[in-house]
Amino acid sequence: MSDLRPSEPTASPFAIVPGAVVDERGLAHVAAPAREQRDLIAGRALAPLEDRVVLAVDGVDRLSWLDSITSQALTALAPGTSTELLVLDPQGHVEHAAGVVDDGERTWLIVDRSRSAALVTWLSRMRFRLRVEPQDLSEEVRVIGGTAEAVAALDPLAIWHDPWPAVGTGGWGYAPADPHPGESYDWAEAIVPVDAASRLAEAAASGDQPVAGWMAVDAVRVAAWRPRAATEADGRALPHEADWLRTAVHLDKGCYRGQETVAKVHNLGHPPRRLVALQLDGSDADLPVGGAEVFLGDEVVGAVTSVARHFEEGPIALAYVKRTVPVEADLTVAVDEGRIAAAQEVIVPPDAGRTASIPRMPRLSRRR
């Protein structure tokens, strides 16, 4: 079996692209993040997702094994079907999330690099005597994101089609907005050999293929209210708080770690926090960072998880706030120079749960 220790990030091959700005997450942008967002949505640009790691699970017991230790029903997963799973702690908090696709012989998991080491270690400890072989493929493959049609042209080893925001079998959606802002969210992630990513970088450097950095990817994701483990799994997040039950949890499957909390909160109670979308005051260039405090008056009621500057909506963010914060309340968010105004949109309503009556609510008008 291959070494399960995940490799450290390597230098980005996309640094050769004219105008490229590269940081610890990889390619951040190529001088024009707003244009990159438009190109991503239109299917013209591809995004190297250098903050992703691919894990593979081989062996005849792989799907039933993953089913038994995660939040998703996977035993009968058909080849080519994409889904999402969560690994929860015993109290039901989200520790890891992974995009999942099986090709009939191997299960591919796409995970955040920042959490991959802990996940690989945990998976290796959970094998027992089952016929499964988890592997870290960091040295062999890369992940390229974009629209489903755009990434299919790469001739990938596998493609994960993000199921968000559809409510999967056994799932449950809390967001009251109609339509959901992720309704047109067309996102897929292709797993390609390392040399294919290098060829893409060369094509981008020569001007033959537009590429987009993680800033554009985040902006499209935040606008669709799409949670991600690296940002929305803050150590105490329950799946309910981010509306993650819709794509990553099967409420009617057998036991797994954290399942009791998932069922209890959904059936008998309400999550203590709720994820909201924030329309930020864009009159100042100063934007909050992840972890910035959210205020109701002078009381701290939450924290920002993701921030982006969208090409149509302007500055936007996702944040957790206390469940008791009124949905119509005007909020502010801490920045270096003080605070900025933040108008909230309901992602998870205060009464979220199986017995809640969730009214359909119009979305706020979008600013340009």
Image: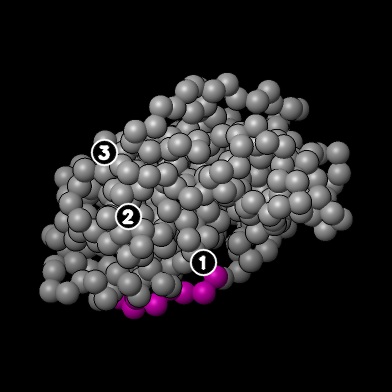
Residue at mark 2: 261
Number of the label disc, if any, that sits on residue 114: 1
Relative to 67, 7 lies left or right: right
Judge by depth and name the residue closer to the eye, 75 or 209: 75
Q: Marks 3 and 2: which is nearer the front?
A: 2
Helix or strand or loop: what does disc 2 sit on? helix
Residue 3 colored magenta? yes
Judge by depth and name the residue closer to the eye, 72 or 297: 297
- Residue at figure coordinates x 49%, y 63% from the top left: 235
- Could you tell which of marks 3 and 2 lies nearer the N-terminus? 3
Q: Classify residue 269 by image quadrant.
A: top left
Is the N terminus in the top left, top right, bottom left or bottom right quadrant?
bottom left
Residue span colored magenta = 2-9
- Alpha carbon separation for disc pair 3 and 2: 16 Å
- Residue at figure coordinates x 79%, y 54% from the top left: 335
Residue 343: image location, x then y, percent: 70, 36
- Alpha carbon separation for disc pair 2 and 1: 26 Å
Q: Main secondary structure of the magenta part?
A: loop
| Amino acid at the residue labelled 2 | Thr
Residue at mark 3: 170
Residue 263 in sight from this viewpoint: yes
The local crowd at label 1, few if under 14, some if 14 to 19, many if 20 or more residues have their Cα within 10 Å, is some
Number of the label disc, if any, that sits on residue 81: none
Q: Are marks 3 and 2 in contact (CB under 8 Å)?
A: no
The local crowd at label 3, few if under 14, some if 14 to 19, many if 20 or more residues have their Cα within 10 Å, is some
Judge by depth and name the residue closer to the eye, 208 or 261: 261
